[in-house]
């Protein structure tokens, strides 16, 4: 497997409106759709195929950091899938990949269903604002905390 194979998986996941793509040795590629993990009809991934996909995403510095720390999180733009956050890690000596689809654009506050108070918080000159909650739910629940 190569970058082109990874591209096929990213495109397939985007077409199915998956929130995540999970690539694990010994398991077929898996898509998280509406909160459920669905396995593809493909063969299980081999360690060699998965390592090839993982390392194809990394520049030499990132690869060295991954080899040293056994985990790495990067963000990459993809022509068809939009921006994706890729988390690479080693489990039982094998590389694994988790991809989170972030979309082609950043949604507005209104589209996210966030209150107007967020606009005021975003204009503060310092502080930390955390907006958390589950992804992929029909009626998202948001938890907002702030510290200034």
Image: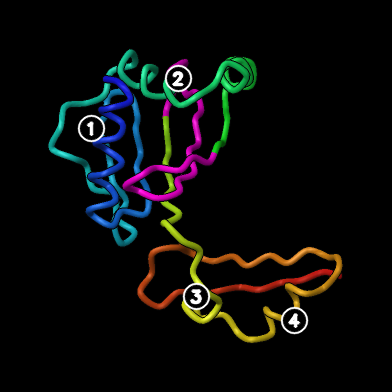
Residue 74: where, in percent of width, then height? Answer: 55, 37
Give the x, y percent position of residue 84: 45, 45
- Upstream in the sequence, badge 1 or badge 3? 1
Near-viewer residue (101 or 140): 101
In x, y percent, where is residue 33? Answer: 29, 56
61 falls in the magenta region:
no
Tell me how far mark 4 sits from mark 3, CA to CA.
16 Å
Q: Which mark is residue 55?
A: 2
Q: Which residue is mark 3?
A: 112
Q: Nearer the viewer, residue 83 or 37?
A: 83
Mark before the other along the chain sequence, 4 or 2: 2
Q: Are marks 2 and 3 in contact (CB under 8 Å)?
A: no
Give the alpha-carbon distance from disc 1 to disc 2, as whole Å.
19 Å
**Element type at mark 2:** helix
Say left or right for 1 vs 68: left
Numbered tag placed on residue 120 in the rendering:
4
Mark pair 1, 3: CA separation: 33 Å
Principal secondary structure, stretch drawn in magenta: strand
x then y, percent, for residue 52: 37, 17
Q: Which residues are magenta?
A: 75-96
Which mark's residue is nearer the viewer, 1 or 3? 3
Q: Which mark is residue 28?
A: 1
Whichever of callouts 1 and 2 sits on the residue coming sooner in the sequence is 1
Q: Nearer the viewer, mark 1 or mark 2?
A: 2
Instruction: Look at the numbered disc 3 and give the secondary structure of its residue.
Output: helix
Q: Is residue 91 magenta?
A: yes
**Mark closest to the chain's N terminus, 4 or 1:** 1
Image: 33 above or below 85: below
Earlier in the chain: of badge 4 and badge 3, it is: 3
**Residue 95, above or below 16:** above
Question: Which marked residue is nearer to the observer: mark 4 or mark 1?
Answer: 4
């Amino acid at each position: 497997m190569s970058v082109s194979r990874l591209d096929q998986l990213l495109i397939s996941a985007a077409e199915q409106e998956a929130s995540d793509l999970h690539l694990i040795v010994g398991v077929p590629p898996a898509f998280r759709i509406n909160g459920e993990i669905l396995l593809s009809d493909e063969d299980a991934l081999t360690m060699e195929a998965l390592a090839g996909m993982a390392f194809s995403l990394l520049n030499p510095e990132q690869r060295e950091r991954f080899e040293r720390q056994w985990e790495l999180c990067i963000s990459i733009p993809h022509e068809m899938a939009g921006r994706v956050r890729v988390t690479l890690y080693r489990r039982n000596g094998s590389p694994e990949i988790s991809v989170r689809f972030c979309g082609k654009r950043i949604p507005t506050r209104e589209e996210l269903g966030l209150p107007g108070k967020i606009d005021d918080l975003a204009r503060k000159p310092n502080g930390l604002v955390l907006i958390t909650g589950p992804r992929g739910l029909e009626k998202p629940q948001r938890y907002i905390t702030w510290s200034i």
